[in-house]
Image (spheres, rainbow, N blue to C red):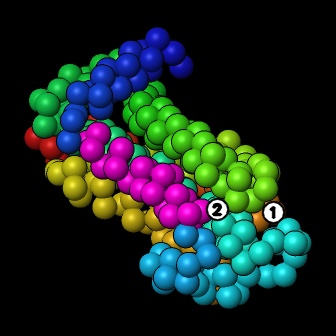
Amino acid sequence: MNRQRVLTLVRKDLLEVMRNKQALAPILVVPLILVVLIPSAVILLGGNPALLSSINGVRPFLENLPAGFVPDGLNTQQTVIYAVIVFFMAPMFLLIPILVASVTAASAFVGEKERRTIEGLLYTPLTDRELVLGKVIASLIPSVGVAWTSFVMYTIVVTVLGGPVMGGAFFPTATWYVVILLLVPLVAVLAITLIVAVSGRSTTMQGAQGLAVLVILPVLALIVGQATGLMLFDLWVALIAAGVLLVVDVIVFALVVRSVSRERIITRLG
């Protein structure tokens, strides 16, 4: 593998992402809602029953919360804060890398066509594996970067606002380290690889972005599972999910590399 050629492709794609101001807006707005507005509301209004009705799924989640997962000795407000911040928000956080990936990866081939650079890209001496890998890395960097930055902001908000209410620091937990260090990159890779594959067959970026729904569905299943009491997104669930995603990522990447056909892409996008 020629690393220099892959790095050149990655740098070019990253510059295109930074220039796309329309893509930057949703990348910034949704994380702000998840990491600033929601935790702030939960911490400041955790004892207010109206809050439980304002955030979808919170009330049934708290009602079905298994015993023993929240530290003993917490009052009602502290229990709500701990349960929502530590458990309920964990799978929702995985929506951030998927969102960013859906915006950046969708331009993998379709964006090249819109910029009229697709033919030059496909005739470069890159192998199919290098081509796919370069596109994946170029979208992975902003996806993980935004998610990790969001985590830092989330931690600051939770610590500054929640520390005094909880009587000390309680975040992050071991589960969250698995979410950030393992699940975020793995989820991003899966979303990006699938979108890159479809972007080679799509004529619009919106069509390529549609495949991100397939990656969102398992995340929504985790959220619903928690809300209904079927499961709790704890350390073991996070580790099992990371192991499964690693296997799936390797298989999907190999299949996408094998499915890449430069002639077909030129025909469809021409």
User: Who is closer to the viewer here, 269 or 145?
Assistant: 145
Residue 24 is one of the magenta-drawn residues: yes
Q: Residue furthest top?
A: 4
Is the residue 164 above or below the residue 118 in the image?
below
Which range of residues does the magenta coloring cover? 23-44
* Label 2 SS: helix
> Is 38 displayed left or right of 230 in the figure?
left
Count neighbours of disc 2 (C-alpha within 10 A) and say few if under 14, some if 14 to 19, many if 20 or more.
many
> Is 191 displayed left or right of 121 in the figure?
right
Residues at discs 1 and 2 in contact (Cβ within 8 Å): no
Residue 136 image offset from top left, x and y in percent = 45, 37
> Is 160 displayed left or right of 257 in the figure?
right
The residue lying at 46 percent from left, 11 percent from top is 4
**Residue identified by numbered label 1:** 236
The residue lying at 56 percent from left, 63 percent from top is 44
Residue 161 is one of the magenta-drawn residues: no
User: Can residue 186 be seen?
Assistant: no
Mark 1–mark 2 distance (CA, rounded to whole Å)? 18 Å
For the stretch drawn in magenta, what is the main secondary structure?
A: helix
Q: Report the disc number at residue 85.
A: 2
> Is 117 displayed left or right of 172 in the figure?
left
Residue 24 image offset from top left, x and y in percent = 29, 39
Residue 32 image offset from top left, x and y in percent = 42, 50
Q: Nearer the viewer, mark 1 or mark 2?
A: 2
